[in-house]
C-alpha cells in the first residue's frame, strides 16, 4: 500500500510476478516513482469509485425498467391532475407537490439507481461518520446513525424504493384527497415515505 513520506506518498514497485518488492525486502525499490499526496488520494478515490459502480447488465436493465415504470405512473397521474384543473388553478397545480415533489423524488430515484456509489471509502468503517457526499448528492443523518459499508448498500436500496413509492404517492394523494389535505401535508407525507425506509434500513444494518 502507498507509504506516506512527508507530503508525498510512494507507490510500491510491483515486479512481474505481482510481488511488492519494497514490502518483501523492507527497502525502497529502484526506479520507484513518488506521487503527490493529492494525486495518490485521487487514484485511491478513482479505484473506490470504479468498485462501487460495478453493476451487471441485468441489474442495469432491471433498474432502468423500474425507473421508466415509475416515471410513466407519475406522468400519468400528474397529467390527470393538471388537465382536471381550471385554467386559474393550473399554475397552482404545477407548483404543488404532485409535480415539484414528484420531480425531486424522480431525481432521487435516478441517483440511487444509476449514479450512487454503493462502496464507501474505508475510513467510514473506522470512524463515526453520518454524512455522505457523492458529487452533488448530500445525505446527513446527524446523530441518528453512522454510515459505513455495512449499512450503506441497504440505505441505497431503501432510497430507491422510497423515492419510487413517494413519486407515485404524492400525485395519487393529490387526486384522491387534494380537496381535504393541503399541499404541504402531501409533501410532508411524501418526504416521510422517502426517508423512513432509509432510516429503518440504516438502523437495522448498523
Image (cartoon, rainbow, N blue to C red):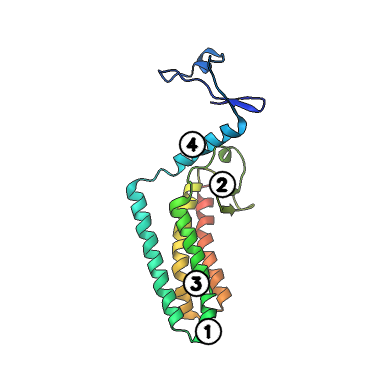
Is residue 203 found left or right of 59 in the rendered image?
A: right
Q: Distance between the residues labelled 2 and 4?
A: 20 Å
Q: Distance between the residues labelled 1 and 2?
A: 43 Å
Which residue is at the front of the view, 114 or 149?
A: 114
Labels 3, 2: front one: 3
**In the image, what residue occupies the spot 53% across and 38% down?**
45
From where the camera sits, is residue 179 visible?
no
The residue tagged with tag 1: helix, strand or loop? helix
Q: Residue furthest left?
A: 58
Which residue is identified by label 2?
147
Q: Distance between the residues labelled 1 and 3?
A: 14 Å
The residue tagged with tag 2: helix, strand or loop? loop
Which residue is at the front of the view, 108 or 202?
A: 108
Which residue is identified by label 4?
47
Whole-percent x and y of residue 203? 54, 51
Which residue is identified by label 1?
89
Is residue 160 found left or right of 96 in the rendered image?
A: left
Which residue is identified by label 3?
99
Amino acid at each position: 500500500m502507498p507509504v506516506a513520506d512527508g507530503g508525498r506518498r510512494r507507490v510500491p514497485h510491483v515486479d512481474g510476478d505481482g510481488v511488492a518488492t519494497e514490502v518483501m525486502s523492507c527497502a525502497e525499490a529502484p526506479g520507484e516513482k513518488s506521487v503527490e499526496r493529492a494525486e495518490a488520494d485521487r487514484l485511491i478515490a478513482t479505484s473506490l469509485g470504479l468498485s462501487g459502480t460495478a453493476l451487471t447488465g441485468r441489474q442495469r436493465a432491471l433498474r432502468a425498467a423500474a425507473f421508466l415504470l415509475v416515471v410513466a405512473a407519475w406522468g400519468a397521474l400528474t397529467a390527470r391532475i393538471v388537465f382536471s384543473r381550471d385554467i386559474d388553478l393550473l399554475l397552482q397545480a404545477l407548483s404543488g407537490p404532485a409535480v415539484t415533489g414528484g420531480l425531486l423524488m424522480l431525481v432521487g430515484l435516478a441517483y440511487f439507481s444509476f449514479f450512487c456509489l454503493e462502496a464507501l471509502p474505508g475510513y467510514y468503517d473506522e470512524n463515526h461518520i453520518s454524512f455522505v457526499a457523492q458529487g452533488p448528492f448530500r445525505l446527513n443523518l446527524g446523530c441518528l446513525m453512522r454510515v459505513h459499508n455495512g449499512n450503506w448498500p441497504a440505505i441505497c436500496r431503501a432510497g430507491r424504493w422510497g423515492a419510487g413509492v413517494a413519486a407515485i404517492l404524492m400525485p395519487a394523494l393529490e387526486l384522491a384527497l387534494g380537496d381535504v389535505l393541503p399541499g404541504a401535508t402531501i409533501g410532508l407525507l411524501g418526504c416521510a415515505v422517502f426517508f423512513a425506509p432509509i432510516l429503518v434500513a440504516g438502523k437495522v444494518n448498523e
